[in-house]
Image (cartoon, grey):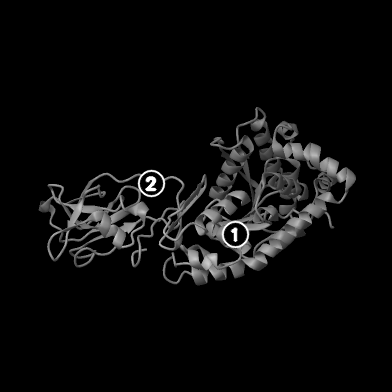
Amino acid sequence: MAGPSPALILNALPGDAHALAVGFSGGVDSSVLLDLAGQCGHPVRAIHIHHGLSPDADQWTDHCRSVCQRYGIDLQVVGVRPRQQGQGPEAAARQVRYQAFEAALAEGEALLLGHHADDQAETLLLRLVRGTGPDGMGGMARVRPLGKGWLVRPLLDQTRRDLKAYAHDQGLGWVDDPSNDQARFDRNYLRHHVLPTLTARWPQAVSAITRYASHRRDEAQATRPLVDRWLAEHALFNGPAGDEAPGAIGPLPVESLAAEPIPLQKVLLRRWLTVGGMAVPGSQQLAAGRAMLLEASADAQPQWAWPGGRVTRHRGYLFRLPAQWPAVPAPLRLRPGAAQAWGDIGRIVVGRRVAADEGLWVRPPRPGDRLPIRRGGHTPVKERLRRAGVPPWWRHRLPLLVDGSDKPLALIDGSATGEGPGDDGLFFAPARLPSGPDWHWLGPGRG
């Protein structure tokens, strides 16, 4: 394996990447990466994330400024403050760091990160002991989209020893973070205690582990089009007209999914959650969720929830819903000829000719509400919603049109009430929630 060179970066870049941004911490890995990037012939700048977690953080920033001035490279310093919300300090720092990188990235720019083969081996071992699924064993991706550009890890085939040798040969200076020696952090424990033991017995352990990750990524890339094709053929459509991307895949049919072998069911469920932008639970949770959703009685409506989301079964389909339900909106006075927000879950389009002096309001349905019907009499709102196939999570959130005395007049349920939304009618457009890609589904002809 050849040592560090600019060719590693050039060969890893996506075809439309025209500028480089180096994630520059000042450590040996990113110092080597910055040196190589400056030899590639592309515009280069550096981004330094100042976490403020170490008393030496300001000195590291000063070092990065000095190095960039010597190279004639612009440096952007971004201050962040990690917040531990149910996660460890490593995960919290990583989350805000990537958020900062994504926000700082320009159109068509490739963010270069200095992760190397030892980092990849540590990642796989860490995921293995935590019980990751098959996708997780592919390790860190060499290239993936990020914000307006790309995230690229060109050094994944280089060992930590390779990078230090290059740094010494080129006379590069770098800073060391003392926290990297603290074994109380899981990754550091693997780095200082587990990997040295493995490589003492099996010197090629790091390269073997990283080769395995590469095989897993190749396998995933080869099978993913087949999985996406199955989803596109069987799931309901959930995107704008003409959108054939995986993100347009909507609710999943239980009958079609249950007809497949159980291992394939798990693969399809995992991919369906992923293309919806949801955090996929671990293998045991996924297996339990699959059994709960597919093996319940035909008239049941099982619901599988985990910290990253929830899936529920309704009328023969699986729906991806947010882990936390949005709030039920408060009553709202209608303004004719306007589009008004219905809480955080949608908007109501009010026709231009809706009379302002009629004192029309909308509010969520309540137990006992009844609607007038054309042949005379009334029908319970609850029954009307059930017959229309409106999912349970919408039945107490849809806007109900009432008069000034709170008498129910009509449901505004995603189909035009009156002559049309732009004329005399009313129309409800549910919001699409990133945390629940099937949340906006209102039922047949409305989703």
Q: Residues within 10 Å of mark 1 (few under 14, many from 20)?
A: some
Residue that protrudes farthest toward the top in the picture: 55
Q: Identify the residue at image location x=61%, y=70%.
A: 226
- Name the element at disc 1: helix
370 sits to left or right of 70: left
Between 2 and 73, the one nearer to me in the picture: 2
Please state which amino acid type lies under the numbered disc 1.
Lys
Disc 2 designates what residue?
Answer: 326
Label 2 SS: loop
Label 1, on which residue?
A: 266
Instruction: Say if 219 sits above or below 45 in the image.
Output: below
Quadrant where the image shows the N terminus:
bottom right
Amino acid type, label 2:
Pro
> Residue 258: in sight, yes or no?
yes
Look at 64% across and 31% down and name the residue there.
Answer: 58
Badge 2 vs badge 1, beta-carbon distance below 8 Å? no
**Quick check: can you spot residue 4?**
no
Labels 2, 1: front one? 1
Residue 411, image x and y in percent?
Answer: 23, 57
* Residue 162 on image: x %, y %: 83, 48
Q: Residue at x 81, y 54 (%)?
A: 208
Please indicate whether residue 22 sits to the left or right of residue 103 in the image: right
The residue carrying pointer 2 sits among few (fewer than 14), some (14 to 19) or many (20 or more) residues within 10 Å by Cα, namely few
Q: Give residue 323's position: percent from left, percent from top.
A: 46, 47
Left or right, 368 with reference to 255: left
- Give the position of the C terminus as an image quadrant: bottom left
